[in-house]
Image (cartoon, coloured by chain):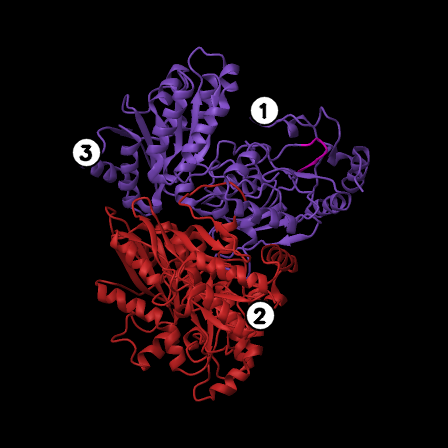
Chain colours: A red, B purple
Amino acid sequence: MLADTATIVARLTEFLGPDSVVADPVQMGSYLNEPRKRFHEKAAAVALPRSVAEVQALTRFAFEHGVALIPQGGNTGLVGAQVPLRGDEVIVSLARINALREIDAAAGHMTVEAGMILEEAHRIAEAEGAMFPLWIASQGSARIGGVLSSNAGGVNVLAYGNARELCLGVEAVLADGRLYKGLNALKKDNTGYDLKDLLIGAEGTLGIITAATLKIFPLPAVYETAIVNLASPEAALELFYTMRERAGMRLNAFELVPLIGLDMQMRHGMLDKDPTAGPSPWYALIEISQPKGAKGGLLQAGLEAAFEAQLIDNAVVAESLADRTRMWAFREQMSEVQSREGASIKHDVSVPIAAIPRLIAEGSEAAEALVAGIRAVPFGHMGDGNIHFNFSQPVGADGKTFMAGAQPVHDAVYEVVLRLGGSVSAEHGIGQLKTALLKQVKDPVALEMMRAIKQALDPRGILNPGKMLD
Amino acid sequence: MLADTATIVARLTEFLGPDSVVADPVQMGSYLNEPRKRFHEKAAAVALPRSVAEVQALTRFAFEHGVALIPQGGNTGLVGAQVPLRGDEVIVSLARINALREIDAAAGHMTVEAGMILEEAHRIAEAEGAMFPLWIASQGSARIGGVLSSNAGGVNVLAYGNARELCLGVEAVLADGRLYKGLNALKKDNTGYDLKDLLIGAEGTLGIITAATLKIFPLPAVYETAIVNLASPEAALELFYTMRERAGMRLNAFELVPLIGLDMQMRHGMLDKDPTAGPSPWYALIEISQPKGAKGGLLQAGLEAAFEAQLIDNAVVAESLADRTRMWAFREQMSEVQSREGASIKHDVSVPIAAIPRLIAEGSEAAEALVAGIRAVPFGHMGDGNIHFNFSQPVGADGKTFMAGAQPVHDAVYEVVLRLGGSVSAEHGIGQLKTALLKQVKDPVALEMMRAIKQALDPRGILNPGKMLD
């Protein structure tokens, strides 16, 4: 029953029209080359359906003939979920299915199709005076279907949650072409199993998300932003607790950056001036948002209390949009500056928040014991317990040699993470990068449940085979 | 392979000891009699395991011999999920598995066993200066396992979400006795399918939840509470939008009550004095909470803006704890006062929030056309789109005759709900009360997915058979 590539291309062309099928390997480039350049497999074809009905038609064909499908959004994923693994897959790009279906800013929801670019969703919400608060570095290319399929996080998770918490309902094409109609704008609906959350974060292995109803929020009227000097991750944790108690769900960011991050950025000329109050082992970027009509000063008051408690001794509060923009640039340029510094061994991990100081201390120590001169650059979403625990190559070392020794560093860091009750993939998912790792570290019963669900919903294994579960 | 009752009781006694098995029908009463007195089936036995290992042992036995198990918490559910349907089931009470496993108030999580009473969880959190914000009428008896299995809501959903959003991870015994170890204190963990949310709200049909890690929050320092007079549900909606824009996630309650609710309570002497600013067709109970260090007056400022916009013309702001308590009593006594008024036909429904005025208008009109003198008493969580759309019998009518005509009223109300994109069970679930209704109204593909998942995780159908899915 397996169809060969020529047959696949011919049948897809029949369903979708010649303008909607890419069969030429060169033209497929932008669908195959992913951001980290780790995966280099070809595809049988790229399909560009223009409607949900076309997705259903091609999925029915794939189901009948055992053709593997890879749903793809903006191709920005970092674990290879959206690119081929075997070489015989058809990439199904959702890019053309990108309409706004409805928006009700006052009621707080909008329904968009999977191919809408995240930044476009931001713009549409803002034009109605509302905010879709999921902000990630790739938002200019990432598409809503991929954002949901990877349960993306970003810098606003502290106040608003991950993609999963920001979605009320989804529509998805199942493995045999049936359409699951789960769109709704309901905050409460206890009529059966939580299929929405099963599809979200499933990396396209259980269904192809075609549309979603997203939560949108009133635009905050005021942002209060600061960078605080901190002696240690322990001090950062204490300050986080203080700010959380005072600001509650108004605290929308608490990001940690080490001194080396500032040094690198200044050295590479990536900041027009130092956004901090001067050298300090650690920095926290803290942001509080306030609605219309609220009195300001919540951040200032919290910082003053922390000064009085001798928890902190120096900080800069943004006094202009330029200040705020520079502070955020400092945080957001952390990935970029590391690539300018040479090779990096990266870990996207989380631990219970109280364990962050131990994670950083023990993880750094373990890596330093393995590679002389390795430079720990742990930074990120401290308030979520999520640290991008990256290591830059020793100054002057050879990048390739450094990367050849990555596995022992991975092993050492993951050992610490698991010992502290953490996760080996906090934000980026499993894809094809971490399937072997998942098998090693995940509760075996959880893996059995996942396999049983995969078998139940995709019995022929045509949806993104080999991703997440091998 | 099916075991008879005597064998079941003998084997359970062997596993658990004689003190942990109730086989006498009279002694089983408190496990069989549920709050609404709708279901009256017997059970083969009640098992009272003292440990997770005992739950696993009895589940393995049940799996081998095809014995149906009904997980039960505080037996407070309103749809019969926790009581027998066939008469041959074993009720597995989690009441004795009720320990606190860990709490870290500063980090914002606590792990408790399924049998802990909700109010005990409140007390434990408060003793550490924190809050577990799930408040429901039955909190003095409801247990955490049942709260999660029914994805309970309550009066704080607006700010904090349903049970699902308040839980970070669960531990559960599966149909064949395997233990799913999904406890964690992580805000971000993208390592596989969302099994936690599948088990939550599954009404014990996919696994027996034995423990959960719950989110806890800093205790608010100040509550600002008011009851506002409103001309109509449309005006209530406008006011909700205004308050939400100004208070954002600080707005933790926006509850709607009609005049008839006040009249009934005053007539039955259930309020020592009128908590409102005087007669008005509708009332909204609004509450904003503020953290330590925040400036007060957010509610007052919002109400002043609404006065200026001529959206409202009268309100009472609570000036003491006694005022606040009376305001909440007014809201919380709505169910009780209706039973004092005679028979009621009830609907626990939700619609997209913008559709609430239409739901109330069209639902009331439809019911009034069916039953002369029927009294619509819609009230509840307006901010969540969730109205308890109840109808009291006509004054002086015979309750039994009134209830005999319930079905056409149900049909009429559900027709309106579904037409408006709503849910026929917003909070209370499906259980055995609404299985037939679910089959009629749910997306058929969603039902097929649910059946496939049920079959995959409980292939012998021993976990709460006939509940949710028939």
Discs 3 and 1 carry the same chain letter: yes
For label 1, the crowd category at 10 Å Cα-Cα, with few meaning under 14, some 14 to 19 and many 20 or more, is few
Residue at (50, 44) in percent of width and height: B443
Disc 2 versus disc 3: distance between alpha carbons?
68 Å
Q: Indicate the chain on which mark 2 is placed.
A: A
As helix, strand or loop, the secondary structure at mark 2 comes to loop
**Residue pushed farthest left?**
B308
Question: Relative to A233, is A414 on the left or the right?
Answer: right
- The image shows residue A465, relative to residue A176, as above or below, that is below
Discs 2 and 3 carry the same chain letter: no
- The image shows residue A13, relative to residue B468, as above or below, that is below
Q: Measured from the top left, where is residue A178 in percent x and y?
A: 52, 53
Residue interval drawn in magenta: B86-93
Q: What is the three-letter code of the residue carrying label 3? A: Gln
Residue at (46, 88) in percent of width and height: A397
Of mark 3 and mark 1, the one earlier in the sequence is 1
**In the drawing, what numbered circle is on residue B343?**
none
Q: Indicate the chain on which mark 1 is placed.
A: B
Q: Measured from the top left, where is residue B46 in percent x and y?
A: 71, 34
Q: What is the three-letter code of the residue carrying label 1? A: Lys
Q: Measured from the top left, where is residue B223 in percent x and y?
A: 35, 38
- The image shows residue B27, relative to residue B170, as above or below, that is above
**In the drawing, what numbered circle is on residue B37?**
1
Disc 3 versus disc 1: distance between alpha carbons?
46 Å
The answer, for residue A361, to whether it is visible in the render is no
Q: Nearer the viewer, residue A70 or A288?
A: A70
Asked whether disc 2 touches disc 3, contact meaning CB atoms under 8 Å apart, the reply is: no
Q: Which residue is mark 3?
A: B310
Q: Measured from the top left, where is residue B319 in percent x and y?
A: 30, 31
Based on the picture, tell me whether residue A35 belongs to the magenta stretch: no
Q: In the rendered image, which quarter contains the C terminus of chain B?
A: top right
Question: Relative to B319, is A434 on the left or the right?
Answer: right
